[in-house]
């Protein structure tokens, strides 16, 4: 079984690749930066240089691939949804031209809305495009990554986080390693067919004050979370250099998943994964503070 993995150095991919290796698979890694593949993995994997937004490169890299773990790269341009559209074109072209039979797609809670959730709309468009192909597809609808706290590390250090979300509204928080585990099991399981949605919700839903309480206990200093207006957050994004469309798309991921949004997949034993926020803080956050 030839399995390809995109963004192998990403939050999920860096865990997924060694899991597949331990399972006896020699995965094909598609990456813009082959030189970043760790030396200890190099002899256990194959590597192809490919930009996941370049259809020609992805098609050229995937002949003979039966199953692929696909991640739309985070938007980088002033037109974020166009970035997602290019990634969608790349994976659909590869599936059609190379006869890839199975796709496991890293999506997000909120993609079920299809419109009105900022960057998540780009993931929704990929879901729709994949569903229109003849391949078997599993969409992993992932909760809010614990690793997103690393994107705002200075705020964590200062002990003051800000959000536009309602503070008392719980949401699913998940460790990227747990997503990788679900992905690995899905990639290796030959029994499923058709279109599937598998949510990955982490161990429990958390409110922002609960997150702050856990951070306070684990860091040994007070961490608080304040809710700020949408407009203030938007201008904060502009102030760090985001183009307006990018700022809109990033903000929309928060504003689109509040005000009564209910995930299509409810929490269950199927969607609940084990790694707690406390464990993730100890393993991933504390070493970089």
Image (spheres, grey):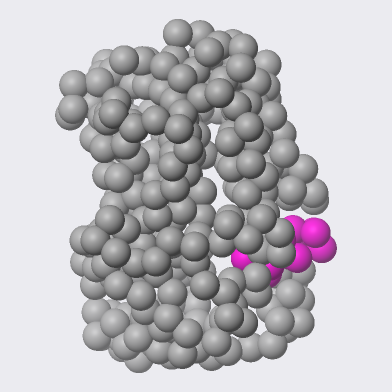
Whether residue 273 is situated above or below residue 95 in the rendered picture: below
Residue 194 appearing in the image:
yes
Q: Is residue 278 left or right of residue 95?
A: left
Q: Is residue 95 left or right of residue 119?
A: left
Q: Residue at x 32, y 58 (%)?
A: 271
Residue 17 sits inside the magenta stretch: no
Percent x, y of residue 12: 38, 45
Q: Is residue 217 left or right of residue 117?
A: left
Whether residue 247 is situated above or below residue 7 in the rendered picture: below
User: Which of 71/170 is in front?
Assistant: 170
Percent x, y of residue 119: 66, 56
Percent x, y of residue 107: 51, 48
Q: Residue at x 48, y 38 (%)?
A: 195
Magenta extent? 241-253
Quadrant for residue 46, please give it.
Answer: top left
**Magenta span: helix, strand or loop, mainly?**
helix
User: Which of 218/57 is in front?
Assistant: 57
Q: Residue at x 69, y 87 (%)?
A: 229
Quarter occupied by the N terminus: top left
Quarter occupied by the C terminus: bottom left
Going by the picture, which residue comes out furthest to the front? 194
User: Which of 16/171 is in front?
Assistant: 171
Q: Residue at x 45, y 8 (%)?
A: 64
Going by the picture, which residue comes out furthest to the top? 64
Whether residue 178 is situated above or below residue 210 in the rendered picture: above
């Amino acid at each position: 079984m030839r399995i390809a993995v995109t963004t192998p150095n990403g939050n999920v991919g860096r865990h997924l690749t060694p899991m597949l290796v331990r399972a006896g698979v020699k995965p094909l890694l598609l990456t813009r930066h082959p030189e970043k593949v760790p030396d200890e993995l190099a002899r256990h994997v194959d590597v192809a240089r490919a930009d996941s937004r370049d259809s020609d490169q992805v098609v050229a890299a995937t002949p003979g691939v039966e199953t692929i773990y696909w991640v739309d790269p985070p938007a980088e341009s002033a037109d974020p949804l166009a970035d997602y559209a290019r990634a969608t074109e790349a994976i659909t072209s590869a599936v059609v031209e190379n006869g890839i039979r199975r796709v496991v797609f890293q999506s997000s809670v909120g993609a079920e809305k299809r419109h009105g959730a900022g960057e998540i709309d780009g993931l929704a468009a990929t879901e729709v495009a994949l569903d229109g192909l003849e391949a078997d597809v599993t969409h992993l609808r992932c909760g809010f990554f614990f690793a997103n706290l690393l994107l705002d590390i200075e705020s964590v250090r200062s002990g003051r986080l800000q959000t536009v979300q309602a503070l008392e509204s719980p949401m699913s928080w998940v460790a990227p390693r747990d997503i990788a585990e679900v992905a690995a099991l899905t990639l290796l399981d030959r029994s499923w067919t058709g279109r599937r949605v598998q949510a990955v919700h982490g161990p429990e839903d958390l409110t922002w004050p609960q997150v702050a309480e856990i951070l306070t206990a684990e860091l040994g200093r007070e961490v608080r979370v304040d809710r700020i207006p949408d407009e203030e957050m938007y201008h904060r994004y502009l102030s760090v250099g985001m183009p307006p469309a990018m700022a809109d798309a990033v903000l929309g991921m928060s504003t689109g998943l509040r005000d009564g949004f209910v995930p299509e997949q409810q929490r269950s034993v199927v969607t609940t994964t084990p790694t707690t926020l406390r464990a993730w803080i100890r393993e991933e956050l504390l070493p970089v503070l």
